[in-house]
Amino acid sequence: MKKRLLLITALILCVGFASAQSADREFALFKRTVAPVMRWGENGILTVPKATTLGKANFFFGAMGQQAGTIDGLDLYLTSASLMAGTSDDVELGYTRRQLIWEDFYLTNLSMDTFHLKTRFLNFGDYLLPQAAIGVNAVSLVDNKFEDRNDILFNPYLAVTSTVPIFTKKILFSVTAVAETIMNENQLGEYRFSGGADLSLFNFLYGFAELQGFNPEESSNEVLNVGVKVRLGFISAGLGLFNISVQTSETDNLWDQYASSLLDLQNANYMATIAFDIRLGAQARSGN
């Protein structure tokens, strides 16, 4: 499995992680590398997936750009474009193309394809009671060719989401917890936990926060991502601040551990997105 991760490691080095980093930060970057450009705050938070789906016959296109370091005085940017479709109310499929580009918009020779599948298996309703989904991101490690299962890195996950209306259904607060791992050549990697919350105001303004690499049994430095999104009809634009280091202290109480944590913005960088929705399904027709 370590040999198969060489491509991911090379990509990590190319996007500004040339110095030694903690496993939490490397995992957070890995998630940004394999996660689709989700509908922020609706079927995902930022890079943490939610248990909610696009809905039957609904389509989504999102594009993203993020800072990716500097080589020989030239800035690099990691760009992503995702096309996703809801094949049923509980299943969504997606494809993402990633490309590293120079600041003058010339393409580098580093690109990557990712396929996504998410299936919701538990749905007690839109509000209060949780929804649950399983999903997987599949990345080819050899020339973007999905020909041999041993050459594909799988990122399976379990997501649980609960949404609570605040006085009205026009103001929604949602929390999500995710457990996931990396699998290659039939070997499972270490389990990781992530979580986050988002707030939707009148289906117009969204706010997000997510914590990646959480492990309650270890003293570690997780990564915090925050962002906002504005939506007008079928188009939305978002801005996120990623890679905020959360330096926790060692205490016996989990709440005290994070209440006394410190935030380090030194390595934080920005991500901008633009997205388009085509809502053809039953939810759109019913006015939701």
Image (spheres, rainbow, N blue to C red):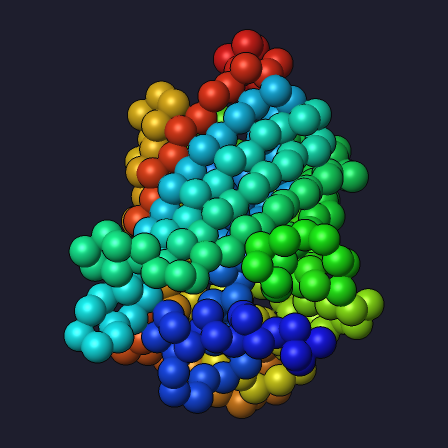
From where the camera sits, is residue 286 visible? Answer: yes
Figure disc tally:
0
Q: Is residue 267 above or below residue 269?
A: below
Q: Quadrant of residue 100?
A: bottom left
Between 2 and 270, the residue placed more toward the observer is 2
Between 32 and 104, the residue placed more toward the observer is 104
* Residue 268 spot, x, y in % from top left: 31, 69
Quadrant containing the N terminus is: bottom right
Q: Is residue 263 left or right of residue 86?
A: left
Q: Is residue 216 above or below residue 173?
A: below
Q: Quadrant of residue 16?
A: bottom left
Between 262 and 53, the residue placed more toward the observer is 53
Q: Residue at x 48, y 80 (%)?
A: 221
Q: Quadrant of residue 171?
A: top left
* Residue 36 spot, x, y in % from top left: 52, 47
* Residue 43 spot, x, y in % from top left: 55, 39
